[in-house]
Amino acid sequence: MLYDKKEIVKRYEHNPILTAEDMPFACSGVYNSGVIRLDGEYLMLCRVESIDISNYFFVATSQDGYHFKVHERPIDLPDDEEFREYTAEMIYDPRITPLEGAYYICFAAHSRHGVRIGLIKTEDFVKYEWCGFLSEPDNRNAVLFPEKIGGRYVRLDRPITPGDHGDIWISYSPDLKYWGDSRCVVTHGRHGNWNWLKIGAGAVPIKTEQGWLEIWHGVHVMAGYQYVYHLGVMLLDLEHPDRVIARGRAPILSPRELYERVGLTSNVVFTSGAILEDNGEVKIYYGGADTVQCVATAQLEDLIDACFHR
């Protein structure tokens, strides 16, 4: 199928907005980062990898959403045996959800046991409370909805199935600790499609009159087993978010620029955060080639329309 040349998502002309050179110490890169608005500022929680392959979360702040200043020190992570054991190899892909007067950070935790979902709570991004792990392995790409639905907390995630396939699932909880009523919401596409290998939730869902807008990623594989990551959009029902109202058939953003094609992992655009502005503009923050942090913009009405017509 041929699609209109109109660009739904427009890259910031001065991308990337954060690179290894912006960090206060020697590092390999700045990876997929969660973003929110807090007290009139944009706040980004960056995953940064030092040159000895240690992983940290750093806070960066901005007045305009484009020019970020990184704090000098990483955030304090839990110092207990359980946390150390299940995060021994890597922590990554933080997503920030404002919920009930606090901020909850879902992230992926990798160890010799596999990868599972961790949760941290903060009210000010100074002090952090460890809430424990939300899943068994192998599961990642978790996002919490920004409000209870039907009296329960809701999350999207992506369990891995044999063959490195993965679909988007939904689960519910009365207390953010015990989860159930899990079911598959969206499956990966047919072989050869842009999302045929695996898909996963990206940004925290944005509530609109038409439904929950979710910006997600899809992966296909080129010759030589080269993964290619794209971004897509879908709408979920406001009261029953396990129901897909509409899902765009084509991606809204694919690797094209050099900073998206060349890096630690080539051919990647991967979002962990999006912000809806008062004027209807959506800032989509995304990692480029697993090396730098970037931003692009779109109009909310265009993203919703893309769910139905793209």
Image (cartoon, helix red, strand yellow):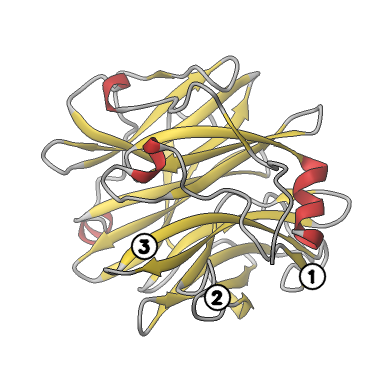
Residue 8 circle label = none
Question: How far from the left and from the top, in percent, is residue 285?
Answer: 54, 37
Question: In whole angstroms, how far apart are the C-alphas of marks 1 and 3?
Answer: 32 Å
| Badge count | 3
Question: How far from the left and from the top, in percent, is residue 284?
Answer: 60, 38
Q: Nearer the viewer, mark 1 or mark 2?
A: 2
Badge 3: residue crowd in 10 Å (few <14, some 14–19, many ≥20)? some
Residue at horizontal 76 percent and vertical 54 percent from the top? 306
Tell me if residue 230 comes above or below residue 57 in the rendering: below
Tell me if residue 166 comes above or below residue 305 in the rendering: below
Question: How far from the left and from the top, in percent, is residue 256?
Answer: 47, 44
C-beta proximity under 8 Å, tags 2 and 3: no
Q: Quadrant of residue 261?
A: top left
First in sequence, mark 1 or 2: give its number. Answer: 2
Residue at image mark 2: 188
Q: Residue furthest toward the bottom?
A: 162
